[in-house]
Amino acid sequence: MSRLLAAALCLPLLLALLPVQAAEEQLFSADGYRLTRYRSPTPPTVEGAQTIDTATLQKMLAGQQPPALIDVFRRPWLHGRFIDDETHENIPGSLWLANVGEGAAEAQWLAYFAHYLKQASGGDHARALVLYCKSDCWLSWNASKRAAALGYTRLYWYRDGIDAWRQAGLPVQTATPEPLP
C-alpha cells in the first residue's frame, strides 16, 4: 500500500515534467523557420508565396513563361560532397537545391541557395519560382520563406510536391543535386 501511495504522489510531479521536456525541442527559430520534424503536416500557406496544386502547376508549366522549378529535398553532405544514399526523382526540368530548406541553414547552404536562385531567375527577382519537396514537408515551406526574404516576389509553394505529381501519373526524372559553387 505504501508503494502505491508513493507512486500516486509522484505521478503529478512526473506529469508536470512532461511539458518541460516537450518544450525543450523548439519547433521554430526566432525568425520563424521550422527547425525539426520536417516530415509532418504543414500549414496551408507560407508567407511570401502562393500555394499551388498540381493542376495549377501544370497550367503554369504549359504557359508562355514557365516558372523555374526548385526541388529542396535533403541530401546527406559529408566531407565536402553529397552522399548518394538513395535514388531521388523530381519534376523534369527542376533544379535540385539540396539542404536549403533546413530551418537553421548554415552559411554555405544560404550562399548556395542565393547563387542558384539568381541563376534560375536570371537575376530577375520577379521571375516565377516554384519551390517544392514532398507532401507534408517543411523544407519547401522554409525554402519559400527564405526565397521571399531574399527579395523574390513571384514565389509559388507546391505544397504537396513530388508525391502529388507522382500520384497524378506525371513524369519524373532521376535527379542529382546542383554542386556547391
Image: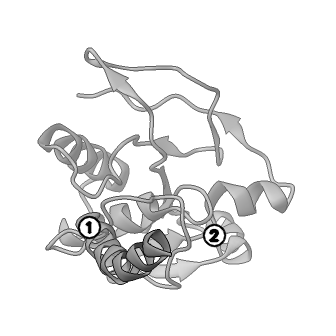
Disc 2 residue type (three-letter): Gly
Q: CA distance from mark 1 to mark 2?
A: 41 Å
Q: Quadrant of residue 6?
A: bottom left
Q: Nearer the viewer, residue 146 or 137?
A: 137
For the point 31% across and 69% down, the residue is: 27
Residue of label 2: 63
In the rendered structure, the answer to whether residue 167 lies left or right of residue 159 reads right
Residue 147 drawn at (x, y percent) = 28, 65
**Which residue: 30% across, 52% down?**
117
Image position, residue 68 (x, y; %): 47, 56
Q: Is residue 131 left or right of residue 175?
A: left
Quarter of image, res 126:
bottom left
Residue visible at 45% across and 64% down in the picture? 138
The spot of residue 95 in percent (x, y) is 47, 43
Residue 143 is at least partly visible in this image: yes
Label disc, if present, on residue 26 of the rendered structure: 1
